[in-house]
């Protein structure tokens, strides 16, 4: 009887000591080959900020398409497809550099091109901006140069002149709203006898309303001015559209947007309707 009691007490004591030792002993680190990287998560608001702004903080690539309908004066049509890239440098600092460019491809109907329809490469563009990031609710700003290269395969598809001029942008963010403008003025460079003299400006005021689940509503019309014309210098559309930023994993968002604009001016050669589609994402991680 005593032996039985002694054995029970001994077993209980060993169990208590074992449990205490296990609780106090440090855990062995997980071997490196068993470690798993946590899933990469990104803030949808940060993704939209980089994809919506003309001054992005992350390199991005965009496929941009514009369909022009009912162009004055004979109701022709045209299509513009552009491959765009923006490459920011030192974007984490207050001051930085943003450069990039676009390669356009155009298709013009006979009514727009003149004698016959035209399809080919347009004038390539390059821009270089010095940027300043906002602090305490201010505006992100950028100012620099915009250059157009005479790469058009036909006179109807581009200026056929080398142009240069100032480019600028400003962006404000207020809660779910993001708004601002970007603009450029281009002048043809003297010394070339090809093509007509160029003096054109374009400004894009924009406003974005960020909604839930990555959705947003926006308006981003392009107001153009041709200072070489004697009349109908300004072409101004109004309109807007919807878009959504999708998280494709690994920190790679995909932004898809569509919009429709109609002209409120009667400038010769300007379309009555413009339908835009844009797909863009980050260039690299």
Image (cartoon, helix red, strand yellow):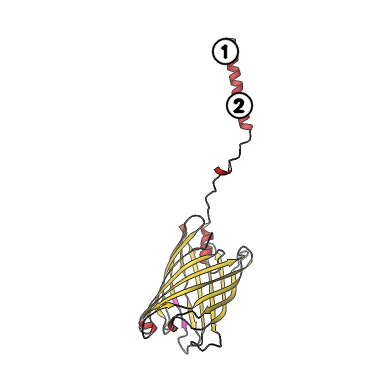
The residue at the point 64 percent across, 32 percent down is: 24
In the rendered image, which quarter is residue 30 located in?
top right
The residue at the point 62 percent across, 25 percent down is: 17
The residue at the point 50 percent across, 74 percent down is: 204
Q: Which residues are magenta?
A: 231-237
Image location of residue 126, percent across then percent down: 54, 75
Pointer 2 local density, CA inside 10 Å: few below 14, some 14–19, many at least 20: few
Front-lying residue, 151 or 170: 151
Q: Quadrant of the C terminus?
A: bottom right
Whether residue 177 is visible: no
Q: Residue furthest top?
A: 1
Image location of residue 25, percent across then percent down: 63, 33
Secondary structure under the numbered disc 2 in the rendered image: helix
Q: Gap between marks 1 and 2, in whole Å?
A: 21 Å
Secondary structure under the numbered disc 1 in the rendered image: helix
Vertical placement of 283 versus 183: above or below?
Answer: above
Report the residue marked by disc 1: 4
Q: Is residue 56 left or right of residue 72?
A: right
Q: In the image, which disc is placed on residue 191? A: none
Whether residue 84 is visible: yes
94 inside magenta stretch: no
Front-lying residue, 22 or 29: 29
Q: Quadrant of the N terminus?
A: top right
Report the residue marked by disc 2: 18
Q: Is residue 243 left or right of residue 130?
A: left
User: In the rendered structure, which disc, 1 or 2, sits on the residue that comes first in sequence?
Assistant: 1
In the rendered image, which quarter is residue 260 located in?
bottom left
Image location of residue 7, percent across then percent down: 59, 15
Front-lying residue, 195 or 277: 195
Tag 1 and tag 2, C-beta contact below 8 Å: no
Pointer 1 local density, CA inside 10 Å: few below 14, some 14–19, many at least 20: few
């Amino acid at each position: 009887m005593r032996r039985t009691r002694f054995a029970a007490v001994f077993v209980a004591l060993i169990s208590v000591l074992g449990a205490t030792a296990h609780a106090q002993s440090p855990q062995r680190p997980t071997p490196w080959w068993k470690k798993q990287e946590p899933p990469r998560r990104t803030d949808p608001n940060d993704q939209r900020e980089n994809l919506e702004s003309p001054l992005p903080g992350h390199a991005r690539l965009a496929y941009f398409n514009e369909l022009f309908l009912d162009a004055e004066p004979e109701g022709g049509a045209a299509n513009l497809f552009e491959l765009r890239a923006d490459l920011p440098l030192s974007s984490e600092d207050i001051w930085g550099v943003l450069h990039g460019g676009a390669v356009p491809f155009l298709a013009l109907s006979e009514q727009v091109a003149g004698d016959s329809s035209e399809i080919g490469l347009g004038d390539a563009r390059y821009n270089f901006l010095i940027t300043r990031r906002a602090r305490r609710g201010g505006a992100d700003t950028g100012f620099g140069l915009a250059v157009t290269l005479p790469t058009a395969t036909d006179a109807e598809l581009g200026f056929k002149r080398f142009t240069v001029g100032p480019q600028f942008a400003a962006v404000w963010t207020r809660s779910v709203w993001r708004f601002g403008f970007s603009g450029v003025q281009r002048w043809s460079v003297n010394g070339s006898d090809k093509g007509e003299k160029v003096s054109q400006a374009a400004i894009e005021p924009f406003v974005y309303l960020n909604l839930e689940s990555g959705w947003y509503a926006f308006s981003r019309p392009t107001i153009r001015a041709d200072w070489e014309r004697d009349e109908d210098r300004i072409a101004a559309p109004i309109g807007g559209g919807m878009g959504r930023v999708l998280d494709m994993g690994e920190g790679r968002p995909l932004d898809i947007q569509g919009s429709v604009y109609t002209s409120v001016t009667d400038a010769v050669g300007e379309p009555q309707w413009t339908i835009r589609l844009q797909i863009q994402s980050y260039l690299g991680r």
